[in-house]
Image (cartoon, rainbow, N blue to C red):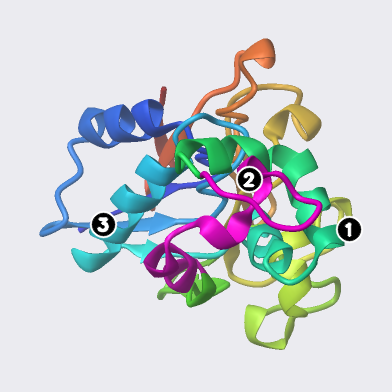
Amino acid sequence: MRTLVISDIHGCYDKFKTLLEKVSYNYESDKLVLLGDYIDRGSSSRKVINLVIQLVFNGAIALKGNHEDMLLKALDDTYNCQIWLYNGGKNTLRSYYISGGYGSIPWYEQPSKIPGNHINFIRNLPTWYEDENYIFVHAGLSCNKNHPSISDEHDLMWIRNDWINSNYNGKTVVFGHTPTMNINKSNTPWFGKNKICIDTGAVFGKYDGKLTCLQLPEEKYWQM
């Protein structure tokens, strides 16, 4: 069984679907792990979430990223809503063809209009997954922590440099969240000591960003 890992899709539905086809993903014989950030910035978040729901139904593992966390917080108050909108949420709402209006927030800025089944799916996503050889998270582990079960949940979705620069000696962690352009100055995965980052900036066309699928344990990868 191959283990295939993809992170930071950010509404890039065509890249996501084509990448799954490129790697000949078969849910009956492959384990697929998705590391979060399915929404925002790209144009097709709704279609990505629909596909992720289908993939999870067929056995894939899907984790929660910081953009899903921002969406859930945006449901609570106007302040968090504006933070989410600034970070790509408007494109997510446009993908849902949202209409209507309330209060001081225009109709196209209402996360509460996203279908309840999508919100519930996102709300119930786990923040980490582990198999015999690897730990999978969206962003990383808390500093001086060797396992996600004792890490701060916020760190699992949000931590960046403190994790990347940490002296971690545990089981290899596969993560996304921090574009590799900011680590190894490239659009290819970063293989550090017991750390692998696969956010290769799919949504950042300006930097020739790619969507990456990593195959484990071979550390072979495909990109779109």
Indicate yes or no whether the magenta region holds residue 29: no
Question: Is residue 59 shown to the viewer in this render?
Answer: no
Magenta residue check for 120 = yes
Q: Is residue 37 visible?
A: yes
Q: Which residue is mark 2?
A: 107
* Label located before the other in sequence (3 or 1): 3
- Report the magenta residues as a range: 99-122
2 or 1: tag closer to the N-terminus: 2
Label 3: which secondary element: helix
Q: Residue at x 24, y 28 (%)?
A: 22
| 20 with respect to 157 (left or right) | left
Where residue 158 appears, x then y in whole percent? 76, 60
- Look at 47% across and 37% down and name the residue there: 95
Report how far apart the C-alphas of labels 3 and 1 lie in the structure. 32 Å
What amino acid is found at the position of numbered circle 3 in the picture?
A: Leu
Please tell me whether mark 2 or mark 1 is closer to you in this view. Answer: 2
Mark 1 highlights which residue?
A: 162
Q: Secondary structure at mark 1?
A: helix
Image height of 83 relative to 10, above or below = below
Q: Position of residue 218 (x, y in %)?
A: 37, 45
Q: Residue at x 37, y 35 (%)?
A: 16
Mark 2–mark 1 distance (CA, rounded to whole Å): 38 Å
Counting residues from the N terminus, which is met first, the one under dot 3 or under dot 2?
3
Q: 123 or 55, which is in the foreground?
A: 123
In the image, residue 96 sits, relative to residue 44, either above or below, namely below
Q: What amino acid is at disc 2?
A: Trp
Q: Residues within 10 Å of mark 1 (few under 14, many from 20)?
A: few
Quarter location, residue 106: top right
Q: Position of residue 46 (x, y in %)?
A: 42, 45
